[in-house]
Structures are given as structure tokens and as C-alpha cells.
């Protein structure tokens, strides 16, 4: 009996993933969580054979949730299923301990293959992501400036580039305007930029912003 | 290399075994930090303001001690190196974490100062934070100041 936990704040997605996986042979038990807090509680209470985790959870960042889940159950495989295109988050996600990375526009076959692989203890990336990662590993000299940003700063940078005001970002992340302003100032400093416009241009040019519903 | 490792281990042990400052038991973390700020300003003449937007703080004892000592270390650095005229401490929290920002208007810490031989104090700060499930991020802007952000994961939501 395989126990799979699906974490996504859209019920439609949870149902869809569940249906796709349920059609596969083998007894399965599914759990669902709609946010990070629920997921953490469920992982603390039970052992799961795999967790499928969306990165765009409301409030708390998906990467933070990923790190926390790994701390609670270090050997539990976590497969990231996200709307964000692969390159944006892939490195951070694997550094944070994910076992695999699949985008929501992947085929059902790919999702099934990914879940099966990570449940067996393997790592899963799509062929195109694998290629991108290999190319990226070769680029050791010119580390792009946004690599020096902490995960939180990276998140704030993307939100600024998507046109959100400091106030709106503060609301989204449940932090004060003051802290968001502090993050913004540090991002500009680390990126050697002076305005939001420069940040936005950089983010778009480097494909760090996908069309997400957020 | 082995010597450096030993020194670090000893430092970590020493840090971990230090007694909890009694003021923390008397006042709780929020007020203890406000007290620290006032003391610092009176002693050094550097304007030091502490704003607590976090409300009631429920970090555990080890985390409170760590934050208290980190702030102490940060203020000492401001006095010794920053050439600043003010430093501000700002606290807030979300259900799963506590954030504390220490900013000064000094000359700004340089990259090499973060990792050089004289950075043992900073190393100590990072160790303190890591030991209790926290993180420290330090950024300096030349001529404008230095900001330290301390994040502490809350153990029970």
C-alpha cells in the first residue's frame, strides 16, 4: 500500500493528480493538503511514500515548505509539481532537497513516471531540464547575479518584477512594508541596480518570471 | 585545517554553554531587546531605536537567548567598525517564523570582512542562529550602511 500526499492549493489540481495516479495498478492511499501548514501537520503525523508539492502555495513559500518537510522526514521523497517553468526554480529546488521536478504542463505519462521514480528512491527530471542543468553546470565562471540572492529575496524580486507594490508584496507574504522595503534595498544592492524597472527588465530577460496565476 | 575545526568546535561549545542572561527571564525577549537598545544608546551615544511589531513573542528559551546575544554582537560591531550615527532594530513575525532586522547607517560591511580572519564574531553569530533553527543574512552597502536579517523558525505553531 503506497501512501501519497498531494499538496496544492487548488482542489482541481489535487483531484486531477489523484485521478491520474489512481489509474495506475497497485494499492494506494491518498492524502491531500491545501497549504504548507496542513502538509507539515500531515507529514508529522504519518509516513508517506511520496509527497507531491506545488511551489506556489499561498502565504508561505513552497521552497520553505520543502525545506521544512525534509527536516521532519529527511528520507521521504518529495516531487515538485509546479506551474513555473523549469529553469527558474530547478536549482534552488534540488538544493533544498527535492527528489524531482515536474511542470504542470507535462504529460500524464511524465507525471506517472516521475512519481514512480521518486518513490523508488530515484531522482526525476525531464529530459529537457536535464539538458539545461548540464549546460548550466558548465557555466561556472559567470554566475548570474540573482544566484547570490537568498530564496526569500529571489521571491520578492519576482514579485516586484511582476508589478506588485511593496504594500501588496507585504500583504502576500504576511510581512511588514518595512521588511519588504529592506529586502528590496538588499536585492537592488546585490544586483547592482537602482530601480524596480531595471529589476523587471532583468527578470523578464532571464526568463525568471512565468505566467503564474498568483 | 584541523586546528580551525577544533577552534570552531570549542567556540560552538562555549556559545552553547553560556548561561542565559537573567534579564531575559525578567523581561521577556521584546522588552529585553528594547532595554539593550537603550543601554547601547546611553553608553555609546549612537542613536539606537528598537521597534517591536511582533507583539507577544513565543520563541523558546534557546532561541530567545540566541537572538539576544546576536543583537548584542551586532551592536558591538556597529560600535567598533561601522562608524554609524544610528542603528535600528525592527522585529516582526509570521505564524511560522520570527524576523529581526538590525540596520545601521555606517560605512557598510565589505565582502572580505564577512569571511576574513577578523570575522570570528560573525561566524559566532551564524553558529548561534543555526544551532536554534535560524538564519542570518548580512548585507552592506558602501557608504550607506549594513543590514542584518535574523530569521528564526518557530518550533510550535
Image (cartoon, coloured by chain):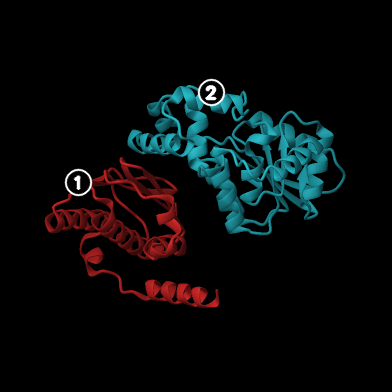
Dot 1: chain letter: B
Query: Which image quadrant for residue A176?
Result: top left
Location of mark 1 (residue):
B85
Q: For the C terminus of chain A, give its image quadrant.
A: top right
Give the x, y percent position of residue A63: 57, 44
B80 and A27: which is toward the camera: B80
Image point (84%, 35%), residue name:
A109
**Picture colour for chain A:** cyan
Q: Position of residue A98 (x, y in %)?
A: 67, 49
Q: Which residue is mark 2?
A: A201
Q: What numbered label is drawn on residue A35?
A: none
Does the rendering let one see residue A38? no
Q: Which colour represents chain B?
A: red
Residue at 60% from the left image edge and 30% from the top image edge? A208
Instruction: For mark 2, name the chain.
Output: A
Task: Classify A38 as above or below B11.
Answer: above
* Picture residue at 31% right of the left edge, 41% below the top: B143
Residue B37: percent from left, percent from top: 20, 54
Q: Along the horizontal axis of the image, is B28 left or right of A167?
A: left
Is A26 rendered above or below residue A72?
A: above
- The one of A179 and A25 positioned closer to us in this rendering: A179
Q: Quadrant of residue B60?
A: bottom left
Q: Residues within 10 Å of mark 2 (few under 14, many from 20)?
A: few
Q: Of residues A69 and A166, which is closer to you in this image?
A: A166
Amino acid at each position: 500500500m503506497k501512501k501519497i500526499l498531494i499538496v496544492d492549493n487548488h482542489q482541481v489540481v489535487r483531484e486531477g493528480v489523484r485521478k491520474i495516479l489512481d489509474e495506475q495498478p497497485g494499492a494506494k492511499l491518498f492524502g491531500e493538503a491545501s497549504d504548507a501548514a496542513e502538509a507539515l501537520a500531515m507529514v508529522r503525523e504519518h509516513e508517506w511514500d511520496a509527497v507531491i508539492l506545488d511551489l506556489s502555495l499561498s502565504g508561505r513559500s513552497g521552497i520553505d515548505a520543502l525545506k521544512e518537510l525534509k527536516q521532519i522526514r529527511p528520507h521521504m521523497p518529495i516531487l515538485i509539481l509546479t506551474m513555473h517553468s523549469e529553469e527558474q526554480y530547478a536549482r534552488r529546488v534540488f538544493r533544498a532537497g527535492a527528489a524531482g521536478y515536474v511542470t504542470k504542463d507535462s504529460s500524464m505519462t511524465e507525471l506517472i513516471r516521475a512519481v514512480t521514480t521518486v518513490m523508488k528512491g530515484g531522482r526525476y527530471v525531464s529530459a529537457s531540464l536535464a539538458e539545461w542543468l548540464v549546460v548550466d553546470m558548465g557555466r561556472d565562471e559567470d554566475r548570474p547575479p540573482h544566484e547570490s540572492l537568498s530564496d526569500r529575496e529571489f521571491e520578492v524580486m519576482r514579485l516586484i518584477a511582476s508589478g506588485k507594490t511593496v504594500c501588496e508584496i507585504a500583504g502576500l507574504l504576511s510581512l511588514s512594508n518595512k521588511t519588504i522595503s529592506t529586502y528590496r534595498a538588499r536585492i537592488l544592492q546585490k544586483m547592482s541596480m537602482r530601480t524596480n524597472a531595471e529589476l523587471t527588465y532583468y527578470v523578464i530577460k532571464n526568463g525568471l518570471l512565468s505566467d503564474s496565476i498568483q | 585545517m584541523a586546528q580551525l575545526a577544533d577552534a570552531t568546535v570549542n567556540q560552538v561549545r562555549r556559545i552553547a554553554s553560556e548561561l542565559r542572561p537573567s534579564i531575559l527571564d525578567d523581561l521577556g525577549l521584546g522588552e529585553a531587546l528594547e532595554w539593550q537598545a537603550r543601554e547601547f544608546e546611553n553608553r555609546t551615544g549612537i542613536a539606537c531605536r528598537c521597534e517591536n511589531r511582533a507583539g507577544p513573542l513565543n520563541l523558546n528559551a534557546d532561541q530567545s537567548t540566541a537572538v539576544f546575544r546576536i543583537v548584542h554582537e551586532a551592536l558591538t560591531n556597529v560600535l567598533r567598525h561601522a562608524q554609524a550615527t544610528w542603528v535600528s532594530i525592527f522585529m516582526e513575525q509570521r505564524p511560522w517564523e520570527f524576523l529581526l532586522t538590525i540596520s545601521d547607517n555606517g560605512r557598510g560591511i565589505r565582502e572580505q570582512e564577512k569571511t576574513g580572519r577578523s570575522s570570528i564574531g560573525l561566524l559566532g553569530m551564524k553558529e548561534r542562529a543555526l544551532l536554534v533553527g535560524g538564519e542570518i543574512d548580512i548585507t552592506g552597502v558602501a557608504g550607506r550602511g549594513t543590514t542584518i536579517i535574523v530569521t528564526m523558525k518557530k518550533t510550535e505553531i
